[in-house]
Image (cartoon, rainbow, N blue to C red):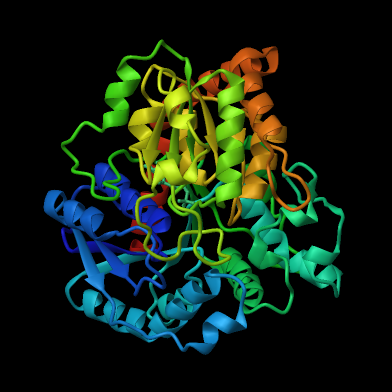
């Protein structure tokens, strides 16, 4: 076997996307250990959680993974005022980085035969670079098939109306996805004149032009949706492109993210606390790497949790300093006594633990004291819950998470919906009821059974002969064929 063969991966810089892509690299190596994996790192557009310790640990443990930092680009100050969406910053970094991607691919090609260039779905501009250099370009979707279907369908929605999606106020019929209210589309899809909308629209058109789409899901989790996508049902009627192969290689999940100030060898205090709790009794509340709540919302959650009578483990962050609902700037640890209602910590100390800023989520979800998960529906969190067999309450906050809620509640049936009021606020009563319903009701029991079954399906998909393993082997074979052909 030619040991000079390489795959180049190009993640979008925010941590969730980066880690998912690196894990894809590791997965590829399990199947094809003689490959070298090159990862292009574009300038982070904003500082959320640090990726440095994660990158250092991968470099230290996996010598076949080589990181290439692309030259730093600078964002014009006007960009932040031109869009209400932080995704615009990411797109701008990626746009400016495109010439550097070209240089990096040329330079890697001097030493290696680059078999494939795998881009995050934000990095569509890279496809033209790959085509120019005659390298097959693939996309990697770090979210589920429900989102992929909606994303592929965006050009169709755009063509069928002159309005912004936010003004449609209608149920969208996206092939393979349960009826989805227009307001459930990701925030950057809502405003037709926003630069982020234009970037997503453009990127949606690149996907079908690639040599293949790799997606972090598995057949039996999203069978109907994956079929609709593969059949080309999500493409515009007048689009004569045929869908490239879809490779469902998931669930790809990873423990030990090494969050804020956390030493990877330490056992986190919350895991020790969980050891002392009864089996399946604790509800875990955690909202991704970026999720933030206002002080008023945190207080409502606290009151709801207290009234629910359930045991809980809750990750709390400082409220946003501006009107951003995501942590795009570095966050300091919260002062819990100041943030939460008077006496809350004392009154709940025998059945609840509040953790500041970050908890080792995968380890927590797999602890046998955990019985439920209130999640922001980030796709990594969803897959981690599936792999741990823990049912969810779906409380989306940003990105494509509102689509994920509909998929989890209506299609896969592994979550109960957290219902917000019109302004997005969730009252204590709703928190109390939903948490209790998850832990004590028949409905809760039914989604628990369903997610436990999916946990076994996930294991089967990844094992020898399973759908995800077969898809991975096919993907790698396709790389060999392209170069041979
Ligand atoms: N995570 C964690 N501890 C936290 C918050 C998040 O370990 O306190 C991890 C979580 O396990 C998941 C990732 O961060 O792997 C978040 O990814 P996801 O796709 O769920 O959401 P995002 O942060 O991208 O919105």
Residue at 38% x, 72% y: name it: 135
Above/below status of 237 relative to 315: below
User: Residue 370 sits in which quadrant?
Assistant: top left
Q: Is residue 230 visible?
A: no
Which residue is the extreme one toward the front? 342
Q: Quadrant of the C terminus?
A: bottom left
Residue 339 visible: yes
Q: Position of residue 108 (x, y in %)?
A: 23, 74
- In the image, residue 480 sits, relative to residue 99, either above or below, namely above
The residue positioned 72% from the left and 34% from the top of the image is 410
The residue closer to the viewer here, 376 or 408, is 376
Q: Residue at x 33, y 57 (%)?
A: 480
Above-or-below relation of 453 to 151: above
Task: Give residue 393's position: percent from left, percent from top.
Answer: 61, 32
**Is residue 24 shown left or right of residue 165?**
left
The foreground one among 342 and 204 is: 342
Q: Position of residue 168 (x, y in %)?
A: 86, 62
Q: How many marks?
A: 0
Question: Relative to 328, is 217 above or below?
Answer: above
Residue 131: quarter of image: bottom left
Residue at x 70% of width, y 41% of height = 406
The x, y position of residue 45, in whole percent, is 41, 73
The answer to whether residue 224 is left or right of residue 75 is: right
């Amino acid at each position: 076997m030619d040991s000079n063969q390489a795959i180049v991966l190009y993640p979008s810089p925010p941590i969730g996307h980066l880690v998912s892509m690196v894990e894809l690299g590791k997965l590829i190596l399990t199947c094809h250990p003689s490959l070298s994996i090159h990862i292009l790192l574009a300038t982070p557009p904003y500082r959320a959680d640090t990726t440095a310790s994660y990158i250092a640990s991968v470099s230290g443990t996996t010598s076949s993974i080589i990181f290439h930092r692309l030259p730093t680009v600078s964002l014009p100050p006007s960009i932040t005022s031109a869009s209400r969406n932080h995704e615009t910053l990411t797109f701008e970094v990626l746009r400016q980085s495109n010439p550097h991607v070209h240089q990096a691919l040329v330079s890697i090609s001097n030493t290696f035969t680059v078999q494939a260039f795998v881009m995050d779905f934000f990095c569509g501009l890279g496809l033209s670079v790959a085509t120019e250099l005659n390298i097959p370009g693939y996309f990697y979707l770090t979210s589920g098939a429900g989102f992929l279907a909606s994303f592929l369908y965006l050009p169709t929605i755009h063509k069928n109306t002159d309005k912004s999606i936010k003004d449609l106020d209608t149920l969208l019929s996206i092939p393979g996805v349960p009826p989805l209210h227009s307001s459930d589309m990701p925030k950057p899809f809502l405003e037709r004149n926003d630069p982020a909308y234009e970037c997503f629209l453009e990127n949606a058109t690149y996907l079908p032009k690639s040599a293949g789409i790799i997606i972090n899901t598995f057949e039996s989790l999203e069978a109907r949706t994956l079929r609709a996508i593969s059949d080309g049902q999500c493409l515009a009627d007048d689009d004569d492109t045929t869908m490239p192969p879809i490779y469902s290689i998931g669930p790809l999940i990873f423990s030990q993210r090494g969050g804020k100030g956390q030493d990877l060898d330490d056992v986190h205090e919350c895991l020790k606390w969980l050891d002392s709790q009864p089996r399946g009794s604790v509800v875990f509340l955690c909202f991704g790497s970026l999720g933030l709540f206002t002080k008023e919302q945190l207080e409502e959650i606290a009151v709801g949790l207290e009234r629910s009578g359930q045991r809980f483990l809750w990750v709390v962050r400082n409220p946003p300093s501006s009107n951003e609902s995501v942590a795009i700037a570095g966050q300091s640890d919260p002062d819990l006594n100041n943030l939460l209602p008077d006496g809350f910590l004392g009154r709940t100390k025998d059945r609840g633990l509040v953790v500041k800023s970050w908890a080792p989520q995968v380890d927590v979800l797999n602890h046998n004291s955990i019985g439920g998960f209130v999640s922001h529906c980030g796709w990594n969190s969803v897959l981690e819950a599936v792999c741990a067999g823990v049912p969810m309450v779906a409380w989306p906050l940003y990105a494509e998470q509102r689509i994920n809620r509909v998929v989890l509640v209506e299609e896969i049936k592994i979550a109960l919906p957290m219902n917000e009021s019109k302004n997005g606020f969730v009252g204590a009563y709703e928190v109390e009821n939903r948490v209790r319903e998850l832990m004590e009701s028949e409905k809760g029991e039914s989604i628990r059974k369903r997610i436990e079954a999916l946990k076994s399906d996930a294991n089967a998909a990844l094992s020898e002969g399973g759908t995800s393993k077969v898809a991975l082997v096919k993907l790698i074979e396709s790389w060999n064929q392209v170069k041979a052909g």
